[in-house]
């Protein structure tokens, strides 16, 4: 019997990133997360590591981030959206990758794009198509690790920044293996080598 061959590490990272991007495109188009449906109170974190590079993508229901899933209606809601963007970018600095000596390189927050500003008086009829739509927020973090092969665990704590979040699905692919786990609110540690 022929022994299965493993993909080279770069290919493994490319496959994982491709899956993450496919998931993101599907999320954007359908309004559903990779969890299978748009679920308030549930988030998804995907981690891909190859060598010194680590990519983390997180997806949350917009309602869990700002309390609504439509275009902001006034200055106060626009301010909440802006503050949420800053809070989510900063969350990348609070993620801890243990054992790899990793530092955050870049954080990108992707918010839904709305057709037009709803902060106007109007008596005319037109479609407010995204009034009842479900929208997600996506955050991507890039890390560089001095000792990526020694990566042991991820400590993630979105519970303070996103108090309505009740659970977080964590999926990972690293040089050492792959796995997934569901974290309940308050749980924070994911052993990345436990999926071996």
Image (cartoon, rainbow, N blue to C red):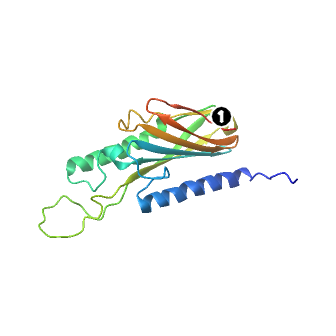
Q: Position of residue 77 (x, y in %)?
A: 24, 48
Asked if 135 appears above or below 94 in the picture, the reply is below
User: Measured from the top left, where is residue 112 in percent x and y?
Assistant: 37, 57
Q: Quadrant of residue 125?
A: bottom left
Packing grade of label 1 (10 A; few <14, some 14-19, many >=20) is some
Vertical order, 129 against 164 (above or below): below
112 or 131, which is in the foreground?
Answer: 131
- Image coordinates of residue 7 in percent, x first then y, are 74, 53
- Which residue is pictured at 18% across the width and 58% down the height? 119
Name above or below for residue 97 compared with residue 82: above
Which quarter of the image is occupied by the C terminus? top right
Q: Nearer the viewer, residue 117 or 181?
A: 181
Q: Residue at x 29, y 58 (%)?
A: 132
Q: Residue furthest right?
A: 1
Measured as percent of width and height from the top left, residue 157 is found at 46, 33
At x 43%, y 43%, the residue is: 42
Image quadrant in which you'd find residue 17: bottom right
- Circle 1 — which element? loop
Q: Residue at x 84, y 51 (%)?
A: 3
Residue projecting furthest to the bottom = 125
Q: How many numbered marks, from 0 up? A: 1
Residue bearing the label numbered 1? 194
């Amino acid at each position: 019997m022929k022994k299965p061959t493993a993909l080279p590490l770069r290919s493994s990272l490319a496959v994982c990133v491709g899956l993450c991007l496919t998931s993101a495109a599907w999320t954007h188009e359908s309004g559903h997360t990779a969890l299978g449906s748009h679920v308030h109170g549930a988030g998804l974190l995907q981690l891909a590591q190859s060598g010194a590079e680590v990519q983390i993508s997180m997806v949350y229901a917009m309602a869990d981030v700002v309390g609504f899933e439509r275009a902001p209606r006034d200055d106060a809601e626009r301010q909440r959206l802006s503050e949420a963007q800053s809070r989510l970018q900063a969350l990348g600095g609070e993620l801890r990758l243990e054992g790899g000596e990793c530092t955050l390189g870049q954080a990108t927050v992707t918010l839904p794009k709305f057709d037009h500003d709803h902060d106007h008086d109007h008596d005319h009829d037109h479609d407010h198509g995204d009034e009842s739509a479900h929208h997600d927020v996506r955050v991507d973090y890039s890390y560089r690790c001095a000792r990526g092969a020694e990566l042991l665990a991820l400590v993630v704590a979105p519970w303070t920044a996103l108090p309505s979040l009740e659970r977080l699905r964590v999926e990972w692919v690293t040089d050492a293996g792959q796995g997934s786990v569901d974290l309940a609110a308050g749980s924070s540690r994911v052993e990345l080598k436990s999926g071996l």
